[in-house]
Image (spheres, helix red, strand yellow):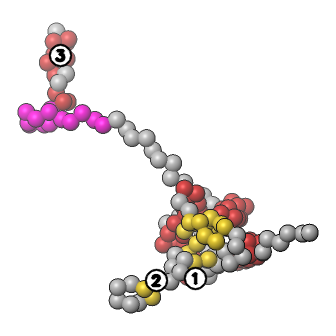
Amino acid sequence: MTDEIDKMFSDLDSYYPGSKRKRREPKAPEVEVDDTWESKSYKKTLPNGKDMEFYTIGALAQALGRPVITIRQWIKTGYLPPSPYRLPTKKNVNGEDHKGRRLYSKAQIDCVVELFKTAGVLHVKRIQWPNQQLTNAIAEAWKNIQVEDSKTTETKE
């Protein structure tokens, strides 16, 4: 008897409630795209002729696991140093200047992630600022990275 009842109600989930219209077949799950922060980069040539890959503030935010607005606020309040690299300024339709995107090198982003890990604030939901030691360490590391990046490639003969 239960088999007949189960058979009678087996198609119940294939119809919309109170309707004679059948439900759509569920789609197969799409393959997730590996969207890490390293996937989108800008290739730029520095004045010394060195070609480098740069990443936007979104990549920095994704690497730190924070929203972009949080990173911008940290830069504005001085917790993070401003980006040493930017895309050129552009004019909009009204003739107003808009600053170019903030760009960060892979070394800078890796350095910040490492410093956040060592400070124990990478996976913390809320960071207690001002953490002057962390701010100074990031500024010093970025300064050293920028100096290394801007060195001209000299050949010894």
Q: Nearer the viewer, residue 77 or 57?
A: 57
**Counting other residues with Cα less than 10 Å from the Cα at mark 1, is it few (<14), some (14-19), or many (20 or more)?**
few
The kind of residue tagged 1 is Thr
Image spot of residue 85 (x, y percent) = 62, 77
Q: Nearer the viewer, residue 138 or 106?
A: 106
Q: Nearer the viewer, mark 1 or mark 2?
A: 2
Label located before the other in sequence (1 or 3): 3
**114 to 74, vertically: above or below:** above
In the image, the segment drawn in magenta is 15-27
**Counting other residues with Cα less than 10 Å from the Cα at mark 3, is it few (<14), some (14-19), or many (20 or more)?**
few
The quadrant of the picture occupied by the N terminus is top left
Residue at (14%, 36%) from the top-left corner?
Answer: 16
Residue at (14%, 18%) from the top-left corner?
Answer: 8
Q: In this rendering, does residue 126 appear at all? A: no
Image spot of residue 151 (x, y percent) = 78, 75
Residue that carries the numbered disc 1 in the rendered image: 77
Pointers 1 and 3 in contact (C-beta within 8 Å)? no
Label placed on residue 7: 3
**12 to 129, vertically: above or below:** above
Horizontal arrangement in the rendering, residue 18 relative to residue 54 (left or right): left
Which secondary structure lies at badge 1?
Answer: helix
The quadrant of the picture occupied by the C terminus is bottom right
The kind of residue tagged 3 is Lys
Q: Is residue 125 magenta?
A: no
